[in-house]
Image (cartoon, coloured by chain):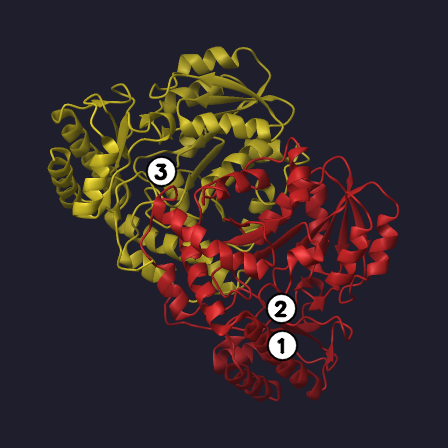
Chain colours: A red, B yellow
Amino acid sequence: MPITDHVKLFIPGPIDVSEKTFRAFTRPMIGHRSGDFKKLYGGIQPRLKTLFGTTQPVFLSTSSAWGVMEGAIRNLVGSGKVLNCMCGAFSDKWFDVSKRCGKEAVALQVEWGQPILPEQVDAALAAGGFDAVTLIHNETSCGVRNPLKEIAAVVKKYPGVLLIVDTVSSFSTEAIPMDELGLDVLLTGSQKALALPPGLALFSASEAAFERAATIKDRGYYFDFIEFKKNQEQDMTPSTPVISHIYALESKLDDIFTEGVEARYARHAKLNGLVHDWVKSRGFEFFAPEGYRSLSLTCGKNNREIDIAEWIKRLREKYHCVIDGGYGKVKGKTFRISNMGDETEETITELLGWLDDTLEA
Amino acid sequence: MPITDHVKLFIPGPIDVSEKTFRAFTRPMIGHRSGDFKKLYGGIQPRLKTLFGTTQPVFLSTSSAWGVMEGAIRNLVGSGKVLNCMCGAFSDKWFDVSKRCGKEAVALQVEWGQPILPEQVDAALAAGGFDAVTLIHNETSCGVRNPLKEIAAVVKKYPGVLLIVDTVSSFSTEAIPMDELGLDVLLTGSQKALALPPGLALFSASEAAFERAATIKDRGYYFDFIEFKKNQEQDMTPSTPVISHIYALESKLDDIFTEGVEARYARHAKLNGLVHDWVKSRGFEFFAPEGYRSLSLTCGKNNREIDIAEWIKRLREKYHCVIDGGYGKVKGKTFRISNMGDETEETITELLGWLDDTLEA
């Protein structure tokens, strides 16, 4: 395919990667057991901890976030049950993946587009016998932002129940302080708001998570949390890591801390507001109820019953960019617009103009 | 770290990535469920099949090869035993990983540097009750090349025993025809002879492998072979793939088929011969016996008892390149020189001159 055939992505990941990031991405290879690598990994650790809001080490997994999502099940769920909070395509799938790992999984299912409420989690956990809860903070498929703080407080009422949180599409767009909230696993991926290419997952885990893992025998190797910890203590990863992505991550951390973490969060909130305003003013409704809407992407409901696929086709042809036309069973019934990564008021305003132009066609 | 600080790698992976590959590596992102991605993955499939010597599809895993090595255990080993052929650091570790997956693993252990012999495999399998055998074709840590064809013939005598072969450091340096040899899993990684950055593993599997997988319940999701197959049928991967590496792979396949597959094999054999001759003529012995030496790297024995670490330090300082100073328990007792990837007679001859210059210092 021609290299010039660039279609800018406003889908909720992967998103566009900057030229600066790509320059870091193509630095020469180094041995992954070398001093050069240790310096690289060790060097980014403090800033990663700040972003994760934890004193625990942050681990780098050469995989998509799904690998760590499966790994968290294998490491934290033993003979007890896992409660999977389900409100969209990805959280539904986590239930399926839990079962595929041979675990006893219990579904806490709400309608797609609705949030998981703390009282629902409380009622489910009251049955007893749970090892862990899985929660997707920002259910990307539906643009639902679950009340993480309130749910974490509920889980804390149940000793021995560990909370695994996927922040794939919310990480680095708002504060998610792992230690303060008492999360046991916080995980994310590279290709969403971090605006890196896909292929790297990042996670951290509490002491309780490691204690649990130590009691489970068949947690495997590639996603073994204890193996990650043992290697991180020497600034290394268990297996050969995706070095280029780690170079790119280092460069992106420079960007994030130059902008300022709080300024970055404020920028994402502001851009999200611009898209929200546009959606509302054009007569669209939102797929998620007020108070539970994602800050990193906007999921509009197709209440105007337009041909979403045709709209995106026009957008692609005329403006060489795309938004998303709905995921899985809500394809065509919803649309999603990302405001993640390096976007600015200027680029989002420009996009909204293009959306207007192609919507009316 | 400064981008200009380039140390050329003659270690057995990762190795240097060419500028051409890096140009492909930094093509703009695309959605992984888009037509663009399907075209990319579908487009490279025929050439991948040729390299693997199979009519089966070739799968792309966003992981290091270890992920697929663990996946092969989870997918092919049920309640039966797995025989792990062990002759070095990586094959030894596969035994450990098999046990960590909760499987009954049996060690066929030979001394590091010695090959696995077909009669040893035969004797071990005669005990009965095996689901699978793991074999590392080219044990990178010791420079041992195991007699794959002969071992595969032995395994064929035992119906129901599947053969899993790691060709991480031999793939694309010599013909390894999967279907002709009757291999059930053939797997490799991106950062060895393919000269791509680390982070992508490639594998293919026989019909018998899929039939076995279908009988195993807790094989998980991320490395589930059946999930890979189901997605590949639509030119997709189960999880968000490491897109940049797939761009780079496409570019590398262009290179390989432009050079010609046979010419590529001949080049690697020739360069390997140059390094072998140098090692011998400088009074070093080989770590592996004749007839069982790797064609993609050379593992010399430090019978001259030189200070290997100091030698490599001088090489790095004076010529900005490195060879490897031995792995694990043979560190300092061996050294390894890679002839993988894009090297030529000119670059290898130049390296040998540098080795001479720094060896005598």
Q: Please, what is the three-letter code of the amino acid marked with disc 1? A: Ala
Q: CA distance from mark 3 to mark 1?
A: 48 Å
Neighbor class of circle 1 (other Cα within 10 Å; few <14, some 14-19, many 20+) is some
Q: Which of the image's four quarters has the C terminus of chain B?
A: top left
Q: How many marks?
A: 3
Q: Chain of mark 3?
A: B
Q: Quadrant of residue B210?
A: top right
Q: Which quadrant would residue A4 be assigned to in this image?
A: bottom left
The residue pinned by badge 2 equals: A174
Is B242 located above or below residue A329 in the figure? Answer: above
Q: Which residue is mark 1?
A: A269
Q: x and y percent of residue A266 in the render?
A: 60, 76
Q: Amino acid at mark 2?
A: Glu
Is A272 on the left or on the right of B138, as rendered?
right
Of mark 1 and mark 2, the one earlier in the sequence is: 2
Left or right? Give the position of A221 relative to B282: right
Looking at the image, do the residues carrying marks 1 and 2 touch, with CB atoms under 8 Å apart? Answer: yes
The chain carrying label 2 is: A
> Does residue A56 sit above or below A1 in this rendering?
above
Taking the spot 45% from the left edge, 37% from the top edge, the residue there is: B187
Residue A189, image quadrant: bottom right
- Residue annotated with mark 3: B171
